[in-house]
Image (cartoon, helix red, strand yellow):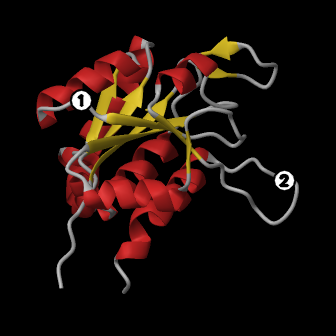
Amino acid sequence: MSIKIPFFYLLLVHYPVYNKRGKVVVSSITNLDIHDMARLTRTYEGKGFIMVTPLRYQQMMVERIVTHWKQGFGAVYNPNRDEALKLVIVKKNIEEAVRHIEEVEGKKPILVATSAKRWEGKNISYEELSDLMFESEDVYAIVLGTGWGLAKEVIDSCNYILDPIYGLGNYNHLSVRCAAAIIVDRLLGRRVGR
C-alpha cells in the first residue's frame, strides 16, 4: 500500500531569534545543523531545507560546506551526503524563503512555527497538523528557531504554532536538530507503520 507523501520544507531561522537575555539577534550557523537537518529532510522526503540568515559570510560558509560534499574529495568519500545536501538552500530572510517555495511549488506555503514554550493563539497539535499534511495538497514550511527561539514577529506571521515538545522533567532545552527530528517524525513517521 502506498501513502501520499506531504509536501514540506524545513526552515531553520537564524534571524530574527532571541538570545538568552530576550534580545533579538542573529545566531550562528553550525556545521552539524547543515548536515543533520539536510539528512532529516531527505529521509522524510522533504522538498528542501532552507537556512535563513542575513549575514553574507554565514551564507558563504554554508555554500562552501555544501560544495565540499558535492564536489571533489567529499563527494568521492561520501556520495550519500550529496543526496541530502542538494536540498540545502540559503536565503537572507523568511520572506525570501517563502518566495522561493512559492516559485518552486506554484503556491504559497502554510507556515508552521515551532517553539519550546507554549504561545497563545493559532496552536495546533501534532495529530491535527499531520492530518492536514496527509489529507491536503498544500505545501507546509516547518519554521524552526535557533538561539533561544523564534522572535514574536515570526511566530505572529505563521499560520499555525505547533505544540511544544515536552520531556519527562523540567529540563526543556533540546538542540534544534533533536527537536526537528522529533517534530518531523511525530508529523510524518506515524503514518508509515513500518
Q: What residue lies at 24% left-to-right and 44% top-to-bottom?
A: 138
> Residue flagged by tag 1: what amino acid is it?
Lys
Figure label count:
2
Task: Kindly indicate the quadrant of the structure image that contains residue 121.
Answer: top right
Residue nearest the observer in this picture, 22 or 138:
138
Residue nearest the observer in this picture, 107 or 180:
107
How many angstroms separate mark 2 from mark 1 (CA)? 36 Å
Q: What residue lies at 75% left-to-right and 47% top-to-bottom?
A: 173
Above or below — where is 101 with respect to 3?
above
Label 2 CA crowd tier, 10 Å (few <14, some 14–19, many 20+): few
> Residue flagged by tag 2: what amino acid is it?
Tyr
Residue 29 visible in the shown view: yes
Using residue 13 as the reference point, say whether residue 141 is left or right of it. left
Q: Quadrant of the C terminus?
A: bottom left
Above or below — where is 179 with respect to 10?
below
- Numbered label attached to residue 19: none
Using residue 68 as the reference point, say whether residue 166 is left or right of it. right
Above or below — where is 191 with respect to 75?
below
Residue named by callout 2: 171
Q: Earlier in the sequence, mark 2 or mark 1?
A: 1
Which residue is farthest right? Answer: 170
Q: Quadrant of the N terminus?
A: bottom left
Q: Secondary structure at mark 1?
A: loop
Residue named by callout 1: 108
**Residue 157, percent from left and from top:** 47, 21
Q: What residue lies at 56% left-to-right and 26% top-to-bottom?
A: 155
Residue nearest the observer in this picture, 116 or 73:
116
Task: Kindly indicate the quadrant of the structure image that contains residue 67.
Answer: top left
